Amino acid sequence: MDGCAVQIPVKIEANLPAPQMGETGKNVEITFWRADWQAMVDGRPDSIKERYPNASVDHYPFEAQSLEKGSAAQTEMATRYSPAAALGNRRVGPRSNPVEDLIAEGPGTLSPAASTTSKGRGLKTADGWSVIITRRVPAGLASGSRTQTAFAIWEGSHNEVGARKMRTGWIPLLMKGK
């Protein structure tokens, strides 16, 4: 998986949370971009064949020729064999935005934010990915104020997935502008 994330403390204060996804009582906000989500936004179909081109599958019951497209039987089969989508999991496709806003207060506590207001766009080049993420600033971060930010990068060709990634510690951030 190729991806990147930007992390900012929820509260603007001198005593920072741990840079590894915050700590108890000291939450961090994370905006996370994924290349496969970008591919869906750019038009790649959200199907098993498109997502896993080398997979070998006999069949999926909800794709059976005998089921009328859009019928109650097809919907019931899709629900049974696609439980994440049936439960409303926001991480499954299709997607209209390649980023997700998250919140954490320490390793193992990552969860979706109430909503995703951030935007992002990734472009694959000969040198790798170029990604732009725009997000709101935390409350209290005004012109001339300072906080910290941290970044994480996942490079799929190096088997980086989940906790295996390259990351920074805190990096000073000075808010300029209006």
Image (cartoon, grey):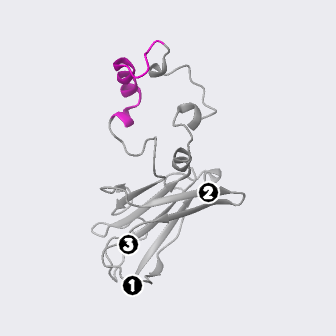
- How many dots with numbers? 3
In the image, which disc is placed on residue 143? 1
Magenta run includes residue 113: no
Classify 10 Å Cα crowding around label 2: few (below 14), some (14-19), many (20 and above): few
Q: Residue furthest left?
A: 25
**Residue 8 percent location from the top left of the image:** 40, 70
Residue matched to label 3 = 137
User: Residue at image x 71%, y 61%?
Assistant: 127
Q: Amino acid at mark 3?
A: Val
Depicted 103 relative to depicted 178: above or below? above
Please name whichever residue, 2 or 16, is drawn nearer the observer in this view of the structure.
2
Stretch in magenta: 66-86
Q: CA distance from mark 2 to mark 1?
A: 30 Å
Horizontal arrangement in the rendering, residue 98 relative to residue 75 (left or right): right
What secondary structure is the stretch in magenta mostly built from? Answer: helix
Rounded to the nearest whole Å, what is the CA distance between mark 2 and mark 3? 24 Å
Q: Is residue 131 left or right of residue 175?
A: right
The disc labelled 1 sits on which kind of residue? Ser
Callout 2 amino acid: Leu
Secondary structure under the numbered disc 1 in the rendered image: loop
Residue appearing at x 35%, y 60% in the figure: 103
Quadrant in which residue 86 is drawn: top left
Residue 160 x, y percent position in the rendering: 57, 53
Tell which circle, 2 or 1, labels the residue nearer the N-terminal end: 2
